[in-house]
Structures are given as structure tokens and as C-alpha cells.
């Protein structure tokens, strides 16, 4: 939506910030930007490792679907966000990167809220035998 401010809050392996390990026969990682205005997940990307390409995939999806202006991508200080390639691609997309401070528990409260709901409503209630089944369940959960 034009004028909507967008922030993506993602994290590192087992960091409670915004990506999680989804229990499957093979591990699955989730990166997802969330709109501060609507609190909706506006893009997502699922993979086996939390990489710059994974988080950029989620950000690209969010921008392509919502076409926001004044985009701020807020994250922790994971290596996928501090990489020069990530900063360069954000600049190309017109996205302003923002990083939280080390040890700030309140900095990622919005991401914590989403993952607490995801864990309670989906992950803790099921075990996924394959990555495909986990991806499908995550897509259904996020897309509603």
C-alpha cells in the first residue's frame, strides 16, 4: 500500500528475534517481513539456512506485493544483515536498513509476538515429516 511503512524483523539460528527452526525431518528456516501498520506478514521466504538471499527473498516479496514507500528494514545484527551485499541490494530497492542494539530485549517484541503465536498454534501441535509439508503448513498459516 502506498505510504505504508514496512519493517522486517529477522534473526539468526535459534535467536528469538524473527526466524525459527521449524521441526521437520530436515530443518526449515523462516524469514518474514511484517508491516508495522497492519501487523500482517507481508512477505516470506523459507529455506534450510538463514542467509542473505533468504531474507532478501522475503523482502522482495513484500515490496513486490505491497509496493510500500519509506521502507525501513529492521533486523538484529546477524551476518546476513551486516553483509555488504545485503546493504547494497537494500540501497538498490530503496530500503533503509536499521539494526537493533546488542542485548535489547524490547527491540524485537513484534517478531517475538508473531513467533509465539506460530509456535503455539502450529509448530507445537504438529510434527512435519518433510520440508514440503512444513512449507505448506507455514504458507497456510501465514496466508490464512
Image (cartoon, rainbow, N blue to C red):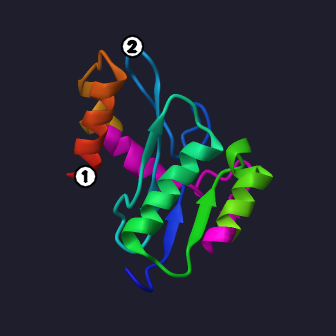
Q: Residue at horizontal 51%, vertical 51%?
A: 57
Q: Nearer the viewer, residue 112 or 93?
A: 93
Left or right: 39 as drawn, with respect to 101: left
Q: From the top left corner, tell me how far across and down residue 6 is, in percent.
A: 49, 71
The residue that label 1 is drawn on is 143
Name of the residue lying farthest toward the bottom:
3
Residue 121 lies in magenta, yes or no? no
Residue 66 image position (x, y, % from top left): 38, 71
x then y, percent, for residue 68: 46, 77
Residue 13 visible? The answer is yes
Relative side of 97 to 27, left or right: right
Residue 108 in the magenta stretch? The answer is yes
Q: Residue at x 51, y 28 (%)?
A: 48
Most extreme residue toward the right is 84
Q: Which is nearer the eye, 46 or 128?
A: 46
The earlier-in-sequence mark between 1 and 2 is 2
Task: Mark 1: give few (<14), some (14-19) or many (20+) Cα within 10 Å.
Answer: few
- Magenta region: 92-118
From the viewer's perspective, is residue 10 above or below residue 27?
below
Mark 2 falls on what kind of element?
loop
Q: Which residue is mark 2?
A: 25
Q: Is residue 97 visible?
A: no
Looking at the image, residue 90 lies above or below residue 71: above
Q: Could you classify mark 2 by the number of other residues whose Cα lies within 10 Å: few (under 14), some (14-19), or many (20 or more)?
A: few
Residue 49 to residue 79: above or below: above
Task: Compare residues 21 and 114 and report the one nearer the observer.
Answer: 21
Where is residue 60? Give x, y as percent: 50, 60
Secondary structure state at the residue bearing disc 1:
helix
Q: Which residue: 77% across, 49% down?
A: 83
Amino acid at each position: 500500500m502506498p505510504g505504508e511503512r514496512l519493517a522486517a524483523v529477522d534473526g539468526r539460528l535459534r535467536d528469538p528475534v524473527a526466524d525459527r527452526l521449524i521441526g521437520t525431518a530436515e530443518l526449515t528456516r523462516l524469514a518474514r517481513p511484517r508491516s508495522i501498520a497492519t501487523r500482517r506478514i507481508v512477505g516470506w521466504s523459507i529455506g534450510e539456512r538463514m542467509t542473505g538471499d533468504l531474507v532478501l527473498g522475503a523482502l522482495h516479496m513484500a515490496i513486490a506485493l505491497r509496493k510500500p514507500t519509506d521502507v525501513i528494514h529492521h533486523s538484529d545484527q546477524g551476518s546476513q544483515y551486516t553483509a555488504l551485499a545485503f546493504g547494497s541490494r537494500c540501497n538498490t530497492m530503496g530500503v533503509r536498513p536499521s539494526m537493533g542494539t546488542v542485548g535489547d530485549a524490547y527491540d524485537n517484541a513484534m517478531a517475538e509476538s508473531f513467533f509465539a503465536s506460530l509456535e503455539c498454534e502450529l509448530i507445537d501441535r504438529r510434527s512435519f515429516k518433510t520440508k514440503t509439508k512444513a512449507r505448506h503448513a507455514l504458507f497456510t498459516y501465514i496466508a490464512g
